[in-house]
Amino acid sequence: MPKPFLLHPAFVHFPIALLLTGLVGAGVSVWSKRWAWLADAVSWLLWLGTASAWGAMGLGLLAEKTAPHVPPAWETLATHKTLAYWTVGLFIVLSLWRRFFKDRWSRLFLLAWLGAATVLLATAYHGGELVFTHNMGTAASAE
Ligand code: HEM
């Protein structure tokens, strides 16, 4: 029997990897203009990372509906969900900022990305708690 809630953990690596790599690229491009291609690479990492955060959110909502319920995990699940909404919202704002203002105000932009990345990591941390502290989605919770 296929388990739709397993799609979410398979997918979450994309926003985490793309948006953290983009953050490093944005940091490098603030301090050095040596690589002209870097600004475009940073924009695409941000846009693809934001699109994949949407995907992770959709698959997360699917996981919430299909994974076996673990009552002690409910509070962590609610926090994880709220943080995920904030993550997606913040990265949508950053994506639009990048689209319309390119790399203007790059230091402020970097600071805002750092803030959004912190919320992303907090989301992922609570996701990890669901699986590794509460066994949500694992064989142990299906017993
Ligand atoms: C930006 C969006 C999101 C990110 C980056 C994210 C990240 C993660 C991570 C890293 C894990 C742990 C995976 C593992 O240890 O293998 C996880 C698990 C989980 N997340 Fe999310 N998450 C997001 C959105 C959501 C949303 C909106 C929900 C809905 C409530 C959700 C529900 C779950 C559930 C139920 C699990 C337990 C594993 C499973 O059954 O799939 N997530 N998440």
Image (cartoon, rainbow, N blue to C red):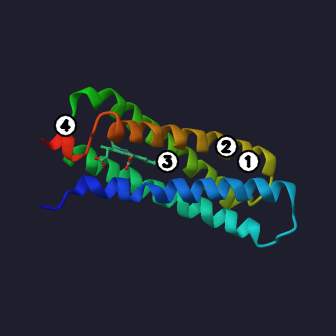
| Kind of residue at disc 2 | Leu
Tell me whether the residue at label 1 lies in contact with that at label 4, contact meaning CB atoms closer than 8 angstroms.
no
Q: Which residue is rendered at x = 60% and y = 44% of the image?
A: 117
Determine which quarter of the picture holds residue 71.
Answer: top left
Q: Which residue is mark 4?
A: 69
User: Where is residue 74 drawn, in percent x and y?
Assistant: 28, 30
Q: In the image, is residue 99 above or below residue 88?
A: below
Q: Is mark 3 within 8 Å of ligand 1?
A: yes
Left or right of residue 75, residue 106 in this image: right
Residue 114 is tagged as 2
Residue 66, percent across and down?
Answer: 20, 48
The N terminus is located in which quarter? bottom left
Q: Earlier in the sequence, mark 1 or mark 4?
A: 4
Element class at badge 1: helix
- Mark pair 4, 2: CA separation: 34 Å
User: Taking 126 as reference, is 75 above or below it?
Assistant: above
Q: Mark 3 = which residue?
A: 88
